[in-house]
Image (cartoon, rainbow, N blue to C red):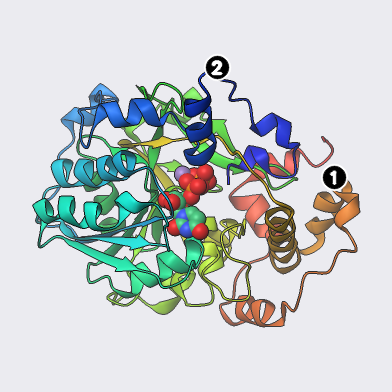
Amino acid sequence: MPAQCFLHSLQNCMDFNHTNPELHKELLKYGFNVIISRSLGIEREVPDTRNKMCLQKHYPARLPTASIVICFHNEEFHALFRTVSSVMNLTPHYFLEEIILVDDMSEVDDLKEKLDYHLETFRGKIKIIRNKKREGLIRARLIGASHASGDVLVFLDSHCEVNRVWLEPLLHAIAKDPKMVVCPLIDVIDDRTLEYKPSPVVRGAFDWNLQFKWDNVFSYEMDGPEGPTKPIRSSSDSQHILLTLNGRNSKVKPNHTAHLHPCMRDMCSRSIGQMCRTEKPKFSQSGKRAIWMCGGQLFIIPCSRVGHISKKQTRKTSAIISATIHNYLRLVHVWLDEYKEQFFLRKPGLKYVTYGNIRERVQLRKRLGCKSFQWYLDNVFPELEASVNSS
Ligand code: UDP
Ligand code: MN
């Protein structure tokens, strides 16, 4: 769910107001303009939004191979298909081990035989897994990952379009440093017009409400010889698109891939987060910061661009709200140490809310020798500490 909808009023998240009732219904169902999506069809070209300096970059011919995991639940057919076709069209096939589609128990008809039929075009590169029950995003991603045979796992939402030379910079960064977890720079696909728009160079961050946000990157940070092509240290990830080593295939020492430990997956992002069964599926806002705290690194690679439709959040049931709160609380109690008070200062009503048993998580944190939240603030995200006294 988009971070901006967390705990805010439903009204803020429902500003679709169309006169066409049919369109309005579909907007509510899919979260974006389906009529335009259908008219765009199953593939299109998007503008190359990379900085010109990226065009001068060359990547080694030998890089790790990627398994691309795309989970979907009732996704609009064309948006899903454009995700797949853009990957197929813009990824060198020798780096593309496979695309693993995980149907998380969709009920929409055209995601069944019609999808299989259209995917025949890409035979050989596509695996499709159909969950027998709805697992929620993170368990679905874990299921996809368990079928992956590439060196690197790539998680994409099912309404993305990749841009030119998107994968090579990401694979190159991981090949140079296996402790890296990387994200592309996420361009915006407008939910109303589906126009593909470039994003400025930003980094992922969050505030004391644990709301994800994008922070501008200062121009002096891009002063060096690499300029705006330089990898950007990110305190948090955007959750839609993420690359990490495939722990199963990796020869790297376990603590370097700690975030891939079956029960550490909540450390990587929401995306990897809800894989842990103790979390309530789909709505966990787990601990991206734990990548850093447990010896990894999270970087945004600006020469890699991927567009994502920022869907309008349309319905928030009380079950979703309570699952979200539950998962935030677990995150706070496992990872924030004494800084949990900063969260509760802003959410006093949550201070005495129960959050289940976290013993296993705390032990895991200890076992992996993860550093303190104070270390994280000092070394990775000083901007957050500086904002202790603000609201
Ligand atoms: N998804 C899923 N199972 C679910 C809910 C979502 O597989 O129970 C998929 C969804 O189709 C999408 C991804 O998870 O590909 C992320 O969900 P969404 O885009 O709704 O989240 P947002 O980007 O709005 O945070
Ligand atoms: Mn999404």
Q: Residues within 10 Å of mark 2 (few under 14, many from 20)?
A: few
Residue situated in front as seen by the camera: 200 or 224: 200
Which of the 4 image quarters holds residue 276? bottom right
Q: Earlier in the sequence, mark 2 or mark 1?
A: 2
Mark nearer the viewer, 2 or 1 = 2
**Picture disc at residue 346:** 1
- Is 160 placed above or below 182 here? above
**Image quadrant of residue 11?**
top right
Residue depicted at 47% across the width and 76% down the height? 261
Horizontal arrangement in the rendering, residue 10 relative to residue 288 (left or right): right
- Residue 195, placed above or below residue 167: above
Q: What kind of element bears circle 1?
A: helix
x and y percentages locating residue 157 in the rendered image: 40, 49
What amino acid is labelled 1 in the image? Arg
Which residue is located at x 56 percent, y 78 percent? Answer: 368
Quadrant for the C terminus in the image: top right
Q: Give x and y (percent) for residue 243.
A: 36, 55
Q: Does residue 50 appear to the left or right of 285 in the view shown?
A: left
> Quick one: 72 or 115, which is closer to the camera?
115
Label for residue 19? 2
For this rendering, which residue is in front, 49 or 297?
Answer: 49
Q: Is residue 234 above or below residue 270?
A: above
Q: Is residue 94 left or right of residue 231?
A: left
